[in-house]
Amino acid sequence: MRLRLFLLQGAITAGFFTFACLLLIEAPPRVSKFFSKNEVDRCDNISILDTTFIYGSCPNNTYLRKPGPDYPSMIATTSCTDSAGGRIDCLYGQRVFNQNNYNTYLIGDSFIQAEEIEYSKSVYGLINNSKTSPYRNSYGFGFSSWNTRQYLQAIKAINKKNSNYDIYLFANDITPRFERSTYGEVNRKTSTSKKDFLLAVKRLLTRSITVQKILQIRSKAAISPQLRKIRNDYWADHINMSFDKCPTSKTKKNIDSFSPLMRDYIMYSYIYDCWDDTQKEAYYLVKEDLKQILYHGNLLNSKVRIILFPAGFSFSDENVPGRLVEDTYYIPSNLSLSLNGLREKLSVDFKNSIIDLEDLLDKEIKEYKKRCERDCSNAYYFGHDGHFTSRGHEFLYRTLYAK
């Protein structure tokens, strides 16, 4: 009798837990999927304004971007694109692209795509909703992991005379070990479609809270205590380092303990003479693209500005915990990594065209955190995603486009 009662209670308990799991784990994503909008934002080998891009934002599209692990600081956002794939206001935007409707073009990668925030809170949304900005009628034209090859294609495709073109340059356009850098595109070893498809899948997966937790666990497990100590030794010395001369053999050994991509970032902190041949070649490719962009802008009798955009890890307590992933970055949250050597080289080569935002943003972030009383981290960059928050886009607007 007792055995039967025990088995019955066990069956009821198991049934309850099964039902609870279905209700709490399985039901929400299924219901969300049922009611959600299209989530496809990318089209491959796409013709945009009679120019073929290897991939870009799907034209005439409406799609939903879910927040993933950055919720609730990031919320689900609906984005709309026009016939050229540029992002527009879903209610009032013109679905058919007409270059005569715009006089300023913001060209870049996912920072300009800005699908993490509402259109009205993006830098071009702020410009277009302003009554005083001299840059009104602005157009955001960018997509995740575009590089200077696509920026050059974009200005040629738009081909609008007497306009303003702002080219947003990010460090991973240059870092050779990033697969979608200009160097990575030129020297890719696998087919374009296969490589880009895998990158797109990776980007979507990393938006999952579960995948983020798995990656964090895997990252910590993959790094031995000895290797972690070597990296910590580097960061302990980093604060007092002089980057106007090359690292010592000991420091170089510590730098070599990081991932290939992270080594690029660190070495671009040092002066040009310290870079390896691959890092120099990667820079040269970007430099040539930027020269072509400036040349084409001159042909169009237009003003071209190169906007050098800092990464979240350039500032303490931003892009945390994304910057802590050990098999990719591993930059302590209380430190900053400024790519001083790269910034200096660009400022010399493009002194009349480049705007380096890092010092201006560093000043603003420090002033903000003096006033901030709680939840002060990740004020300008999302913690996991790493892109600009709405406060970051407000900074861009005030710095570059406000009257």
Image (tube, rainbow, N blue to C red):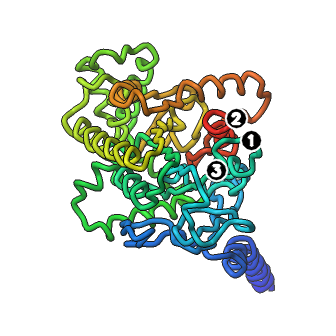
- Residue drawn at x 61%, y 60% is 101
Residue 76 vs residue 342, the one in the foreground = 342
Which comes sooner in the sequence, label 1 or label 2? 1
Residue 133 vs residue 125, the one in the foreground = 133
Instruction: Find the distance from the CA under tag 1 to the CA under tag 3.
Output: 14 Å
- Tell me whether the residue at label 1 lies in contact with that at label 2, contact meaning CB atoms closer than 8 angstroms: yes
Instruction: Find the distance from the CA under tag 2 to the CA under tag 3.
Output: 14 Å
User: Count the marks: how many?
Assistant: 3
- Residue drawn at x 69%, y 40% is 394
Identified by mark 2, the residue type is: Lys
On screen, residue 370 versus residue 173, left or right, reads right
> Can see residue 327?
no
Q: Secondary structure at mark 3?
A: helix
Residue 132, disc: 1
Say which quadrant the N terminus sits in.
bottom right
| Rendered location of residue 354, percent (x, y) | 44, 32
Residue 8 in which image quadrant: bottom right
